[in-house]
Amino acid sequence: MEKFNKFSGLVAPMDRANVDTDAIIPKQFLKSIKRSGFGQNLFDEWRYLDHGEPGMDISQRQLNQEFILNQPRYQGAEILLARANFGCGSSREHAPWSLQDYGFRVIIAPSFADIFFNNCFKIGILPVILSAEVMDQLFEEVKSADGYSLMVDLQEQSVLTPNGEAFRFEVDSFRKHCLLNGLDEIGLTLEKAEKIKQFEQQRREQQPWLFT
């Protein structure tokens, strides 16, 4: 997993509450268990005017020009502003996978659905919770300025605006440690590789019949 310390990126505003995982990645795209390839179908039913199916050539599909991610000023956005209860609905891991595959590293909202929130940390997306009042301010700023970007400092737990205003956020210390060091669940296990090796060797010596 890629380490996360300080990150600056273009911001896109998703100005709607209760965005559920069915909207983030529709059910027909869930057949793959890989973490890649989902970005092209992120918000599929909102991004395109036709019905999407796996394997379709997206270059031949008609874009919904009114959808926020299809607007030229937000191309290449890596930070998503969202409203309350982002990621609600089903618990599918594909939702954060698709956001990451599209290019988002940070999602900022006043609240998240619990399972979605936890799944983000597992793959290296940082979900940041800021108050509804602060979110209102950020939405106004991003809509009024082309190329609006934010700097997110995980070590200092702050979001810095272009004018230098800083907003502090809270994050669990263990999750912070994992992100700063690029440790997913596999990485955490590998940190104990020597102890695991010693345990297995000891088991072979004490219970040799298990290995015949």
Image (cartoon, grey):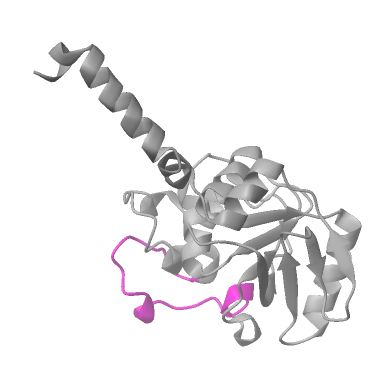
Please say if 158 is above or below 111. Answer: below
- Percent x, y of residue 60: 35, 80
Q: Nearer the viewer, residue 188 or 125?
A: 188
Q: Is residue 66 magenta?
A: yes
Q: Residue at x 32, y 33 (%)?
A: 197
- Span shown in magenta: 48-70
Please say if 185 is above or below 19. Answer: above
Q: Residue at x 58, y 49 (%)?
A: 178
Q: Which quadrant of the figure has residue 209?
A: top left
Please say if 65 is above or below 156. Answer: below
Q: Which quadrant of the figure has residue 145?
A: bottom right
Number of residue marks: 0
Q: Residue at x 91, y 58 (%)?
A: 133
Q: Nearer the viewer, residue 200 or 114?
A: 200
* Side of 32 where 143 appears, left or right: right
- Percent x, y of residue 183: 51, 50
Q: Nearer the viewer, residue 6 or 78?
A: 6
Residue furthest out toward the left? 212
Q: Residue at x 67, y 54 (%)?
A: 127
Determine if residue 67 is in view.
no
Q: Which quadrant of the figure has residue 204?
A: top left
Q: Is residue 90 magenta?
A: no
* Side of 139 where 102 appears, left or right: left
- Magenta: predominant secondary structure element? loop
- Percent x, y of residue 124: 55, 56
